Image (cartoon, rainbow, N blue to C red):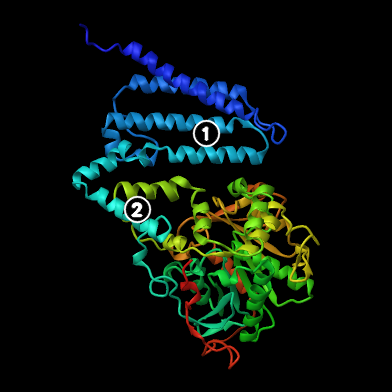
Amino acid sequence: MNSTPDWGAAGEQYTDFFSRQWQNAFQSFAALGQAEPAKTAVQLDVNRLQALQQEYVQEAARLWSQGLQAPAQLQDRRFKSAPWLSNPVAAMTASAYLLNAKALMGMADAVQTDEKTRQRIRFAVEQWVAAMSPSNYLALNPEAQQKALETKGESLAKGIQNMLHDLQQGHLSMTDESAFEVGKNVATTEGAVVYENELFQLIEYKPLTGKVYKRPLLLVPPCINKYYILDLQPENSLIRYAVSQGHRTFVVSWRNPDESLGHLGWDDYIEDAVIRAIDVTQQIAGADQINTLGFCVGGTMLATALAVLAARGEDPVASATLLTTFVDFSSTGVLDVFIDEAFVQMREMQLGKGGLLKGQELAATFSFLRPNDLVWNYVVGNYLKGETPPPFDLLYWNSDATNLPGPWYAWYLRNTYLENNLIRPGKLTVCGEQIDMGRVTLPLYIYGSREDHIVPIEAAYASTQVFPGDKRFVMGASGHIAGVINPPAKHKRSHWIRSDNALPASHGEWLQEATEHPGSWWTDWSQWLQSHAGTQIAAPKRYGKGRSYEALEPAPGRYVREKA
């Protein structure tokens, strides 16, 4: 009996197997073009699919010819550790997965349809591909198996404990949350709460300079997160940096809504929070005008408040800084996959009349925008390997979720992401005033991050075309958070500026003449802000002003400590 394996026949079977898999996938994608033709026309780029099929079969044949010889490396960080490379079966499994993942994503890109449908198909395929990685399963993960053997099963027991802990707390642990405490080692800049209502606390910070600029600075962070992203650690705190530059600095600390606030809407947040914060800051400082800064949704709310004030003929703000902010929602990036009329109507029915959007639901949505980085790597580490993720202040903040009132959320979905009404003069009435961003003529500093997946750089730049006044646009490296929180002392990343300060119609045109500068954009912003800050006066000796606005409690206050 001849026991020598017939590698030629086996190779043919192997290639045939992959070919059949491809044909099945091709038929599935072809069926898309026949689904609901009245609603969405879906076609396939046949030439591209044929090229993908040919490439797939060639790669499959190359993979088979390699046999059980472990590759030198796999071009994916999920499979770069020694157990993957030293185990031929595991290496083959990983290689086959990567081949199929590449093919599936290529097929998704070959779909010819409207942009929204294409994005949805690609997003769905990406989620499925990420979930099916062999690294996510104990039976297929040699690294987790090896650790289980080395620890005599202790890693598995710890993994189960980690899973039960996460189930109890209601979210996946991304960091060692026990290592942080708000007010102790995050949100530590010295200050005091000088005003509060049911929506927010206003924090004033202790000056670090003998003199301060006459016009104070008010920061409006996003209400979908805690404010201390701007004050994580002293060395990377934008708040502390502003204070150190001589600005009398105030920040809105949003209340984490409970059911008692579930009836509040967009108008409430604009009138009773943003506009009220502007007024109180102005009163405390005794200034004719103040400077303002809005980050992300905080910037959108600040822009709305400025439009309301302009409609009223009021001019309490000298300048505004918009960081990674949507005003024009024409290009919303990957978030667009979630938003259509049916989805918005469903949310309006669920939450439009009252209730809460739980913070963890929103946090999970944002995490799945980057599933391999923000979901599955923690599943593998926490549960399969029984590891405790290292302390990281940014990820602690990311897990400290915030609820949203349902009517606020429903209004925001429809009027921004779905209908893009903020840039349509007279389309919206907010706080009793017709909104026209063209009436917001104050100087603006507009910042966008080059790799931002929340507010794409093109969307951040689009604000330059909305407002008619003097504007300065700066692009920073990295993403939504890391691009913004980039202190000069670390000498990290770069930023881009046009020396002529021209603002052509598109970001692509702007970039053609932009110059890269090493390091943080903060120094450029500081110089710009100084030009709008007025003269310098003696720094105040106490918080607030008289009996009207006294220190209520030390910063960071109790609102920021409330858990969703």
Q: SS of the residue at dot 2?
A: helix
Q: Residue at x 49, y 29 (%)?
A: 103
Q: Tell me if residue 445 can be seen.
A: no
Q: Quadrant of the N terminus?
A: top left
Distance Cα–Cα, label 1 vs label 2: 31 Å
In the image, residue 456 lies at what x, y percent?
60, 51
User: Does 262 appear above or below 499?
Assistant: below
Q: To which quarter of the image does residue 437 belong? A: bottom right
Name the residue type under label 1. Met
In the drawing, what numbered circle is on residue 486? none
Q: Which residue is mark 1?
A: 105
In the image, residue 239 lies at what x, y percent?
51, 72
Residue placed farthest to the top in the image? Answer: 1
Q: Earlier in the sequence, mark 1 or mark 2?
A: 1
User: Does 134 appear above or below 539?
Assistant: above
In the image, residue 394 lies at what x, y percent?
44, 61
User: Does 427 appear above or below 538?
Assistant: above
Name the residue type under label 2. Met
In-image side of 191 versus 149 (left or right): right
Q: Tell me if residue 233 can be seen.
A: yes
Q: SS of the residue at dot 1?
A: helix
In the image, residue 347 lies at what x, y percent?
63, 55
Q: Residue at x 74, y 73 (%)?
A: 309
In-image side of 493 versus 62 (left or right): right
For the residues carrying marks 1 and 2, which lies nearer the camera in this image? 2
Q: Nearer the viewer, residue 352 or 86?
A: 352
Q: Callout 1: 10 Å neighbours few (<14), some, many (20+)?
A: some
Q: Which residue is mark 2?
A: 163
